[in-house]
Image (spheres, coloured by chain):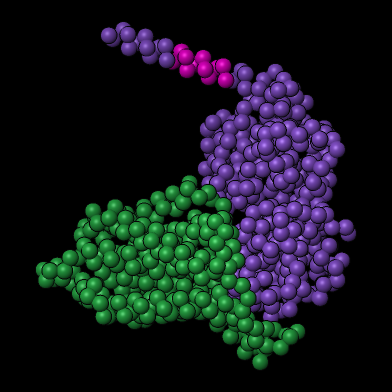
Amino acid sequence: MQDLLYFSQQLINGLTIGSAYALIAIGYTMVYGIIGMINFAHGEIYMIGAYTALIAITGLTALGIAWLPLVLVVALVCAILVSSSMGWAVERVAYRPVRGRHRLIPLISAIGMSIFLQNYMHLAQGSRNVGFPILIEGGFNFGSDGAFQMSLSYMQITIFVTTLICMTVLSTFISRSRTGRACRAVSQDLGMANLLGIDTNRIISATFIIGAALAAVAGLLLGMYYGSVDPLFGFIAGLKAFTAAVLGGIGSIPGAMLGGLILGIAESMTSGYLSGEYKDVISFSLLILILLFKPTGLLGKPEVEKI
Amino acid sequence: MQNNVKKLVTAIAASVALLGAGAAVAEIKVGIAGPMTGPVAQYGDMQFSGARMAIERINAAGGVMGENLVAVEYDDVCDPKQAVTVANALVNDGVKYVVGHLCSSSTQPASDIYEDEGILMITPASTSPGITARGYELVFRTIGLDSMQGPVAGGYLASLNPKKVAVIHDKQQYGEGIATAVRDTLKDAGVEIAMFEGITAGGKDFSSLVTKLKQAQVDYVYYGGYHPELGLILRQARQADLDAVFMGPEGVGNKDINTIAGEAAEGLLVTLPPAFDEKEENKDLVAAFADKDQDPSGPFVLTSYAAVQLVAEGIEKAGSKDPFEVAAALRANSFETPIGTVQYDKAGDMKSFEFIVYEWHSDGSKTPVSN
């Protein structure tokens, strides 16, 4: 019983982190699916989302507004607005001018953008860790007193529920809406979609905006869950989400979700049963193994060379 | 035209030469190297404010052998790679004395360069024993060692008769070093160590670690490392209802841990150097800091002040600006500083340095715990 509770607790921990990874991973996978480039500045967009949410929360608290749902909604909206405009701007400034060139050029441009945004935040917000106020406290406890108790906090539930909502909305959007259909068309063949009258520039912008909005949601959620943000907040998270996207099959949205969850669970199980020191070793080994045996990732389609 | 250009060039060359000569006569450069930015910049603030104050007061009192001290400041971000770059920049700038670095992992690689290039280094904060264990002639410190601090922390924990203790560290030179010393002290005292484990510095998610601590039913947790990680561990432990008392070294003892951990920082145990700013004989100095709106209570402010003072008095005592002679003078004499009487052993460590256990509060204040 004890062991089962312990296992479930680690599973919950893993799923929490995993669902947030999945939210960030979608940004990588959608951009890759459509223009075949890796947006390395995506982790920074997530970091900016977390900072914006924190600033909004602090501002509202300073104004004396403490009604939790309102605070969360305002913080979420602010984070999404700022991150999305940032995502849009990054695409316009750093990627559109070099689109269609050799693959390496947008990649370098992306890395440059990432370094720029990180250092910009260093200057704008200082390099110290800033703490999030604890807004959602408490949770359910399972197990008898005096022994190991499994806890499922309200914060974790919030993360699951929000992620679930985002994923459902995104799937419906991609499969049902006009823009969603255009997105799929562009990802299949950009040139052809263009010929058939789809404004591909607009679709690409939309992709960046959607990815950034989801990253902002993840930024708010993880900022509150972990408890602090710093300008390097997005670096590791970006790397992990990128791994999740590749694991699930880059370019595939369900793949990103699955990859995120697998990565989160692998991490928490490793720290739970082996040691926290091996957390990253195991998750990146998993990536290498999957790439060795299934180079397209778990749910990815084999890429047809379009030369 | 041709002539004018020649004249101009000559004039510039002459003035540059004059400037250079002027600087060499009237100034002694003291390098201050530490983190101005990065996750532990608050410790850098302590270091820079202490060192600047010392330079200002020494100059006001007539300088060193009639010459003024000039601060040359460098940012190493507490990153070992950056520290090497900084050390090389110092060499190029012709600096002969360094107060720094702060993080042990930066001090270690930088000190190799200083020793090779004949630069005297006094670190006001690095506590890793390895730094002075290599027989270097020019390496000193104005702080104690992990091998002194670890036993104080371990001894205090053992005196509380804990059932089970977990020892966690951030796998860095400072954190792991001190955690190992604490573990060994606890083991010798017969305390059961439930786990000894590393985490990733800069990590954010400690939920699995907290779950593990809960499972192990520990009543005390010792953490070797800095406040950004411990702040998050405390916070996540509180959210998960982990009922254990945490303890850490001076690397966690600053007010930033409160902004991260909030209420969860209440009751944290910290080993710190004694509060030098509360000593009677430092009253004047504390007032001077207060005049500038600076806080002298941080653990590294007065150690940095003392480091600059030791450079100055070492030069006076040696009667020479040669770093090797200054080093010999530092070893041969004893000095009265704001952190007490400083006497060096052969390795460059202070012969005595005290650590005290404090209880940290959620408002950022601390109270000494009686043993």
Chain drawn in purple: B
Looking at this view, name the residue that lies furthest to the bottom: A1
Q: Which residues are magenta?
A: B13-23
Looking at this view, name the residue that lies furthest to the right: B371
Location of the N terminus of chain B (image quadrant)? top left
Q: Position of residue A13 (x, y in %)?
A: 56, 78
Q: Position of residue B81 (x, y in %)?
A: 53, 49
Is-magenta flag for residue A79? no
Q: How many marks?
A: 0
Q: Which of the two residues, A184 or B133, is positioned nearer the viewer here?
A: A184
Q: Can residue A266 be seen?
A: no
**B340 in relation to B41, above or below:** above
Q: Residue at x 83, y 45 (%)?
A: B352
Res. B24 image quadrant? top right
Is-magenta flag for residue B20? yes
Q: Residue at x 51, y 65 (%)?
A: A71
Q: Residue at x 40, y 64 (%)?
A: A80
Chain drawn in green: A
Q: Position of residue B36 (x, y in %)?
A: 57, 43
Q: Can residue B252 be seen?
A: yes
Q: Which of the two residues, B199 or A63, is positioned nearer the viewer here?
A: A63
Horizontal arrangement in the rendering, residue A5 relative to residue B20 (left or right): right
Q: Position of residue B219 (x, y in %)?
A: 77, 73
Q: Residue at x 71, y 56 (%)?
A: B363
Horizontal arrangement in the rendering, residue A244 relative to residue B204 (left or right): left
Magenta stretch: dominant secondary structure:
helix
**A115 in relation to A143, above or below:** above
